[in-house]
Image (cartoon, rainbow, N blue to C red):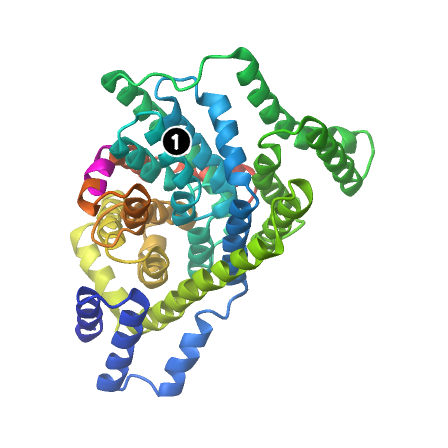
Amino acid sequence: MLLLIGSFLLLMVIGLPVAISMASASLLYIVFYNVAPDIIAAQRLIAGVESFPLLAVPFFILAGNLMNTAGVTGRIYSFAVALVGWMKGGLAQVNIIGSVIFSGMSGTALADAAGIGTIEIKAMKDHGYPVEAAVGVTAASATLGPIFPPSLPFVIYGMMANVSIGALFMAGIIPGVVMTLLMMITVAVFAYVKGWGSDTPFSLRTIFGASIEVFVVMMVPLGIYILTALGLSLNLSILIVLVILLACDWYFDFSAVMALMTPVILIGGMTMGWFTPTEAAVAAVLWSLFLGLVRYRTMTFKTLAKSTFDTIETTASVLFIVAAASVFAWLLTVSQAAQLLSAAILTITDSKWIFLVLVNLLMLFVGCFLDTIAAITILVPILLPLVLQFHIDPVHFGLIITLNLMIGLLHPPLGMVLFVLSRVAKLSVERTTMAILPWLVPLFVALLLITFVPAITLWLPTEMGLIR
């Protein structure tokens, strides 16, 4: 086991990519210790990506790319400006609200940072905000992407822990709202201390217009409920409501109603049994194509091809990590790493709360060095037996792990969001790191609440009958 972990860390230190480091360390361990025939290792490599839930990965990535090319990102930003731009520190609040909406389409922190984050940083700089403030709030709000459904880390965790992905999606909603409120409070504090003003004039007409869009989206499920109560079939009710919605959107040219409908369609479809979470990813792609090609007509076949090739590139890197990590995790299991870790932790404590504190510290540390998907693939099979032994709900544990790893994305030396924002804002990594530090406070407060108040995570999926 020491050879496996040591060689992996050494290869990481000398600068090899995570997937190659894991694959090379695994091969070295197999050659030296002859733990299994080569064919078994090859089978494990293929089995790591031969999973139906993993089909969601390329489709969610493609949906996010298509939303960007369809011009939906700009519409989301305009809507957020109308809704909260009048507040103190208006564009910082816009940054957070925009990320909340965009998270319903992308499912990853990197997509948020590189997509709508680019627009938000430029706008904040143009309005006189310090570039460090723009980078800090963008980094913090990017962590919302994998907490609100849909979420790629939840898909990977659900596959590794054999947990309902739909339950994980529902479990992320209330924690996401808590994180959003904490970030908005932080912006209000910064605005008071640093004297940030509002960025758009207070206008009841503008706020009313944005509120109408939210109201229209909220009326969709209510309209379906009323029509079914009147005796119409569910499918017919949905069809009628969608036709009315599209007609209203075409007539009034709403800024973000169609974008806001994305999570409604995905969550509603899963709740009503129309499609599984994996199939929801395909629905997200179809909705993105409809918006880009039919509703807004901003997508060309050239941009569609670019989005497709970008998706292929990203998916290949993600699945390479999953495949390599699955072999690495299997070798850790064969070398009895889980049993050794269990014995070590049980000698330290028999309290599940102390165990969760230790897990938080471990995942925060790992998240600074290891890719999110690799960390989940490697560590979940090792930690899950202890989670069950301490009677911790696996759905709750999934939220804890994901949030820790999202915070890890903001840290050096390998925090990917850190490097993306450093490039976008044209700041050194050192200055970007210092800019992000104050914004870790609301994230750590949210982490403590989610860890020690399980009801925040479990109440909604329990009420919906997704977990017992």
Residue linked to disc 1: 123
Identify the residue shown where x is 33% and y is 46%.
406
| Magenta stretch, main secondary structure class | helix
Q: SS of the residue at dot 1?
A: helix
Rendered position, 65 above or below 126: below
Q: Which region is colored magenta?
A: 432-438
Identify the residue shown where x is 27% and y is 52%.
367
Rendered position, 289 above or below 38: above
- What is the tally of numbered marks visible in this picture? 1
Q: Residues within 10 Å of mark 1 (few under 14, many from 20)?
A: some
Rendered position, 28 above or below 173: below
Give coordinates of residue 234: x percent, y percent.
Answer: 76, 40
Within the image, what quadrant is residue 396 found in? top left
On the picture, is 243 further left or further right than 435?
A: right
Rendered position, 360 above or below 178: below
Q: Which amino acid, mark 1?
A: Ala
